[in-house]
Image (cartoon, helix red, strand yellow):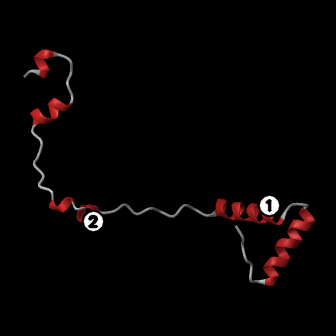
Amino acid sequence: MGLFIKNPEVERKARELARVSGKTLTAVIEEALDRQLALQPDPPRRRPTVEEMMASTDRFRRAVGLDKVKVTPMTKQDWDDLWPTGLPEIDQA
């Protein structure tokens, strides 16, 4: 993958640094980028609001067609049937 540097002065500096350090052009650019990235603070991540999450969920449901599916809530018995305990007195209740 190539990187095209349009600024001749930037290219000259990169080549000069590579020459005086005895490293490849790629190595000096990588090291310079790593140093600069290490200095950058992680941007604060804003947490989405409940309204934004609900809107996102609604968009997803419409996009995949789930808005047309009738949903019936699970009963406790439906839930319990999914997770048998192995104890007849509980599983048969």
Q: Is 93 placed left or right of 54 in the picture?
A: left
- x%, y% of residue 23? 87, 60
Furthest residue in direction left, as rendered? 93
Q: Nearer the viewer, mark 1 or mark 2?
A: 2
Pinpoint residue 71: horizontal percent, then vertical percent.
Answer: 12, 52
What residue is drawn where x is 76% and y is 83%? 7
Q: Residue at x 24, y 61 (%)?
A: 61
Q: Residue 20 versus residue 6: which sits nearer the camera?
A: 6
Q: Position of residue 73 (x, y in %)?
A: 11, 46
**How far is mark 1 from mark 2, CA to CA?**
45 Å
- What amino acid type is highlighted by mark number 1? Ala
- Residue 65: percent from left, percent from top: 22, 62
Q: Where's the C terminus, which quadrant? A: top left
Neighbour class for label 2 at 10 Å: few (<14), some, many (≥20)? few
- Residue 12 placement: quadrant: bottom right
| Amino acid found under the numbered disc labelled 2 | Ala
- First along the sequence among labels 1 and 2: 1
Q: Secondary structure at mark 1?
A: helix
The answer to whether marks 1 and 2 mark residues whose Cβ atoms lie closer than 8 Å is no
Write down the residue under mark 2: 63
Q: Label for residue 43? A: none
Comparing 1 with 52, the one in front is 1
Label 1: which residue? 27
Sort mark 1 into few (<14), some (14-19) or many (20+) by Cα contacts within 10 Å.
Answer: few
Q: Observer-nearest residue: 31 or 74? A: 74
Number of numbered discs overlaid on the protein picture: 2
